[in-house]
Amino acid sequence: MIYLPQRAVFIHIPRAAGNSVTGAIAGVCAGKGIDIILGTGGDIKNWQGMKRHARAVALKEIIDEWDDIYKFAIHRSMGDRVQSVTRLIERDVYNKVHEDPTCPEAWSKVLKNEDKNYWKVFMSHTTEWYTKGNSAEDLGVEVYDFSEINNQWHDICDKCDIPQCSLPRLNSSK
């Protein structure tokens, strides 16, 4: 989740260009007087709504100007997301990330294959789950296709009212 007060919010769907979008927006806004709130990966007390992968329905409740700002997300097919997270898990297991004391407990359990519900939950968290309301109501989130994001990035910058920048491919699956 990236929140640009009075401008925009980005709904970060796991394994769908979120790190690239975060890097681009944070990089172009830093030092330019553009307020930015980045969701965190961990659990910070009293900041549940500002998690990295917060749902639009939760953000709508805590962002006062929700109806007046630009909201967007990136859709990537579930098959591609599964392949991406599988590679991430394999890489992190190989690198023994779960042995690092800074590794979040929930991710450590995934890496040690102790979280038996991980895949069920991951598969149920679709683009619609992240971008729509609890009863699938439209919350005004514009959804871009992952394969087209580079072609549409400059339009997104304009809609977010931020300076033009390039979109890095930090976690490219190609």
Image: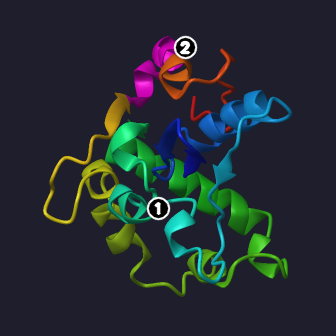
Horizontal and vertical percent position of residue 141? 32, 40
Q: Which residue is pictured at 50% across the width and 49% down the height? A: 12
Quadrant placement of the C terminus: top right
The picture quadrant where one finds residue 74 is top left
Q: Check if residue 74 falls in the magenta segment.
A: no
Element under disc 1: loop
Q: Which mark is residue 54?
A: 1
Camera-side residue of 22 and 61: 61
Q: Which residue is pictured at 66% across the width and 63% down the height? A: 40
Q: Which mark is residue 138?
A: none
* Main secondary structure found in the magenta portion: helix
Q: Amino acid at mark 1?
A: Ala
Q: Which residues are magenta?
A: 145-155
Q: Amino acid at mark 2?
A: His
- Please determine whether, in this image, residue 148 is positioned above or below residue 108: above
Camera-side residue of 11 and 37: 37
Element under disc 2: helix
- Say which residue label 2 marks: 154
Horizontal and vertical percent position of residue 138? 19, 47
Compare marks 2 and 1 and give the one earlier in the sequence. 1
The picture quadrant where one finds residue 168 is top right
Q: Which residue is pictured at 62% across the width and 75% down the height? A: 107
Distance between mark 2 and mark 1 Cα atoms: 24 Å
Horizontal and vertical percent position of residue 123? 32, 62
Give neighbour class at mark 2: few <14, some 14-19, many 20+ (Cα, 10 Å). some
Q: Is residue 96 visible from the viewing direction of this image?
A: yes
In the figure, is residue 33 to the left or right of 157?
right
